């Protein structure tokens, strides 16, 4: 019997706005897995998914915020100029 995989969304998933630019931080895992996946979606629907997984949803959120702080929120856009309104 082939069952669909159940995805567990972290309650730490959230939207972040900096410099007038929004991104959606998505943290999730499969029900039968214990490692978390980190994905950041930009306003245009582009997605950045980390190759590595994280031992906790807190660690995944810390990594997302560190990237925003160090590289800037516009670093998630294919064309950083598109991050401006």
Image (cartoon, rainbow, N blue to C red):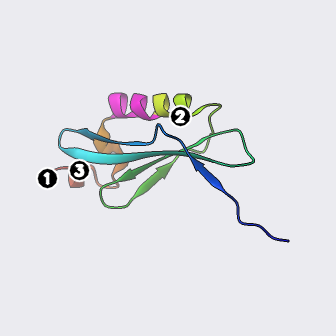
52 on left or right of 10: right
66 on left or right of 21: right
Q: Position of residue 69 (x, y in %)?
A: 34, 28
Residue highlighted by disc 3: 83
Q: Position of residue 28 (x, y in %)?
A: 57, 46
* Residue 67 on the magenta span: yes
**Nearer the N terminus, badge 2 or badge 1?**
2
Alpha carbon distance from label 2 to label 3: 23 Å
Magenta span: predominant SS is: helix
Q: Quadrant of residue 65?
A: top left
Quadrant of the snapshot with the N terminus: bottom right
Residue 59 lies, with reference to residue 12, above or below; the image says above
Residue highlighted by disc 1: 85
Q: Residue at x 56, y 34 (%)?
A: 57
Please identify the residue farthest to the right as the structure is shown: 1
Label 1 crowd (10 A; few <14 / some 14-19 / many >=20): few
Q: Quadrant of residue 36?
A: top right
- What's the magenta region? 64-71
Residue highlighted by disc 2: 60
Label 3 crowd (10 A; few <14 / some 14-19 / many >=20): many
């Amino acid at each position: 019997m082939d069952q669909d995989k159940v995805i567990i969304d972290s309650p730490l998933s959230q939207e972040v706005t900096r410099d007038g630019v929004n991104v959606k931080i998505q943290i999730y895992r499969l029900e039968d897995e214990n490692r978390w996946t980190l994905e950041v979606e930009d306003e245009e629907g582009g997605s950045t998914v980390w190759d590595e997984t994280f031992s906790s949803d807190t660690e995944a959120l810390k990594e997302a915020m560190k990237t925003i702080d160090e590289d800037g929120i516009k670093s998630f856009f294919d064309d950083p100029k598109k991050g401006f309104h």
